[in-house]
Image (tube, helix red, strand yellow):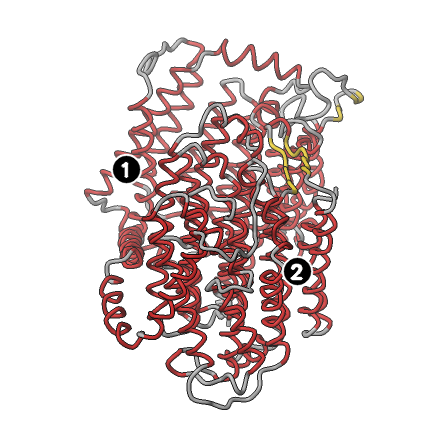
Amino acid sequence: MISFVPPLSRLLLWPSLIIALSLWMKGGASVGGGFPAGALAGLAVLLQYVTAGRDQARRFVAVRYAAPLAGVGLLLVVGTAFLPVVAGYAPMSLFPRPDQPEIGVGGLHLHTALIFEGGLMLIVFGLVVTVIDRFALRTGGEEEESGP
Amino acid sequence: MPILLPILLALACAPLAYVAGRWRTGAAAWMGALGSLAALGALAWEWTLGPGRLVLPWAPSWGLSLEFTRDGLSGLYSAMALGVGALVVLYSRAYMPHHLHEEGRPARDEVRFQGLILAFMAAMVLLVTVDDLLLLFVALDLTTIISYLLIGFDREDPESRAAALLSLVLTGATSVVFFAGAMTLGLHYGTFSLPLVIERAAHDPASTGALVCLAVGALGKSAQVPFHFWLPRAMAAPTPVSSYLHSAAMVAAGVFLLQRLYPLFAPATGVRDGLLAIGFVSMGMGSLMALVADPFKRVLAYSTIAQYGYALVLVALGSEGAPLYVAIHAPCKAALFLTAGAVTQVTGKKKLSEVGGLRHSLPVLAGASAVAAAGLSALPLTAGFFKDEVFFHALAQRGPAFMAAGLVGAGLTLAYTLRLWWGLFGGPRRDVPAAPRLLVAPVAVLAGTILLGGVLPGLLVAPARAAAAAMRGEPSTLELAYHLDARAENLLAVGAWVLGALLFATRRAWTPALSRVLEGTSRFGPERGYRLLLHLLDRLSTWLHEKEVRDLRDRVASVMVPTGLLGLAVLGVTPLRDRFKVGTVGWADVTLVMALAFASAAALATLRAKGHLRLVLLISCVGFSLAMVFAFAAAPDVALTSVLVETTFTLLFAGLLALLPPDRLQHAQEEAQKPRGRDRLAAGVAGASAFLLSWSALSHLQADRVGARTVELAKAAHSPNVVAAVLTDFRGLDTVGEMTVVVAALLGVTSLLRLKGRR
């Protein structure tokens, strides 16, 4: 019997990733944020690992470089937090400042909090995907060893 | 930014030398020496511009700035560090290949060594140029860390490693004490800028505690009693390290700190008397140990302790000659150390009893080191004469008892210096191969400097006065000249020479007795205390470790119980008002209560669950129920995150089960069904603490106080989503900290699982 799960999970990958991105982008205004976005994207990749296997899942660049992505995320987070210090602001000053006008169209507003949340997303995504990848590597290796 | 030029040049030395070393191993030393000479040139050019300060704002909102100064003290000490540094690096070009060959290490490591020496030089130049309490501490710790790498350079040698650890622990611990003192001063005066602190201290003297903390940091660095014992041990390092760190640079840093901070110490006569006593004790002890030590590097190490005792006495007396003393001592001691290294290289011996009669084979080295020895023991026509002149001058103002102590100290110096030089070069002739020219040249250059200063003392006056003025904050009238009359200084000097010569002539009579006495007393010294402390700490950590890793449950308990006790202690010390209130439950809360009841039931079921997979599912059931609670409580953000995290967690947990060996899982399952008494106790403490803490925190919660104001602020911060505003803006720094922890966990997972995979 052909299971409906693998094709469905392949179909689900891109919509989930887009939802994750939207969770990130609108995090400042409504439900969402970098953390759930990263977790959702990680889950989408996890589904690929379960149904298609490690090799198939690793076709995507973002999966192969998940751990460095987490490093980039940390740089973004720390940069947003401490770069304002160089310009003489208190650490963790976000721009535009509360008394400055916002720049943006509709629900999307440009704000440095977006970069910060993006960093969170990359870190969470990197953590989840790396751990899955390590698990898959280990279990896959053992199966080969215990095979005929 | 002219003040930064020497620092920048000094900082560039190490990388440049490294690059040159990649091209050709031998080029590193020349590149480094060239760089340090360039920095010295920049320093001399700046000297003509007169004193100045440079303030770079760093974090103005915290009142922090990077402050640098160009005054007499920084000029004198930078010149010393750069000049001796250049010579030592060149010397290491001739010394290290032989040393590395004996250690069985590749010749390339020479570049690493020279890079470290140059990095140390840069740290030292930074230390003497900064004018800010925090930066002083940073530079001080830089020197400590690099000195650890240098002392432990022979990493195959356990003695070398132990010596490096000892110096790191001791100078690191004392520099933390220094930091405490610096923080106290900074918080008290509201600034870390040194001139401002000194200005405010003029009306409001610094507290004794802070001064003692600062002094402890300086004494540890300068290897004064009771922190002296790291220095002789550090002689396990290659000779260029001893020559540089333990004569001109690292040990000088301690006394430098006291001179830099002298205006703070000036009104505190009690602290200064304590320093005076420590200086005299170090002087006496170092001199006596130097009289009987056999390895010649140890003689020099003990002599360094004694000589910095002199410098400490001068600082404690507030003498103008204190900076000059250190500056003259540096070339003398560096030259003698380099001589010792050269002798070890050509003879292969390290002890005075094994060498001798080398003056015929190594005439230039013998002559140059004779000049350095004469400088160390303050004979006329060398610059060293003036270091004792200022010393005697300061003591003569304090009375006969001080003069007598100074006379004995100077006499002992002459005696051990004579013993050292005669032990190396005197006695029956012995022929050895000639030393490489590059091994002798730095000693000759240093000897030339010492002679020049002795013949033309006028050259020394201007830098010495500038440094004294910077130290004491008032113009200096220091005079350096030979006087052929019966003044107290001259009489003391002559007395010291007679005493030293007498001691040297009769050395066979008293050496055995003295070494027995010193050996006996060294059993009760602070070194023994340090060893005992290290041993006990080792035992304690082993004991704790064994307790912790006995089985999984103990390991969990070792985290949970202390955390629980901490929570209970927090509850114990905070006031009891508005705590542990029981609210009301209305009809609207029914869904909430049902979800909570479901979560509790799942949690209780984990206690009796059979099989790990079932356990994982039950735990995730608790999590999902809580997510439901959040959803009912109108917290969609938390609920969403909760669901996503719970899903990820469950799947990863299930995946983890596949990685664990089945028999281990079986074993753990059986164990978990049979709780022991202490498991129940640990669970009780942790559970009670968590329960009471949550109850107490939730009774504090006032919706209007937290809610309305936060919503308002979130709107102002352009983030209508309150949760996002709290996460990214109001508590942004917390988030940064948490994310750092996440990335650290990621690194841990990657390396752990990769390790397992490889095995």
Q: Quadrant of residue B730?
A: top right
- Relative vertical location of residue A95 with respect to residue B709 in this rendering, above or below: below
Relative to B257, residue B247 above or below:
below
Q: Residue B13's spot in the image, x, y percent?
A: 68, 59
Mark in front: 2 vs 1 = 2
**How many numbered marks appear?**
2
Residue at the spot of label 2: B14
Subunit under mark 2: B
Q: Residues within 10 Å of mark 1 (few under 14, many from 20)?
A: some
Dot 2 falls on a residue whose secondary structure is helix
The amino acid pointed to by label 2 is Ala
Considering depth in this image, is B195 or A5 the residue closer to the camera? Answer: B195
Lower position in the chain sequence, tag 2 or tag 1 = 2
Q: Residue at x 58, y 64 (%)?
A: B450
* Residue B4 horizontal side relative to residue B579, left or right: right
Tell me, yes or no, whether dots 2 and 1 are on the same chain: yes
Residue drawn at 36 percent across, 55 percent down: B282
Q: In the rendering, which numbered label is found on residue B468?
A: none
Q: Secondary structure at mark 1?
A: helix
Which label was assigned to residue B683? 1
In this view of the protein, which residue sits in the foreground, B284 or B750?
B284
Q: Is residue A139 visible?
A: no
Quick one: which residue is furthest to the left in this view?
Answer: B677
- State the image coordinates of residue B558 (x, y, percent, origin top left): 31, 44
Residue farthest front in this picture: B485
The image shows residue B460, relative to residue B683, as above or below, that is below
Q: Quadrant of residue B498?
A: bottom left
Alpha-carbon span between mark 2 and mark 1: 56 Å
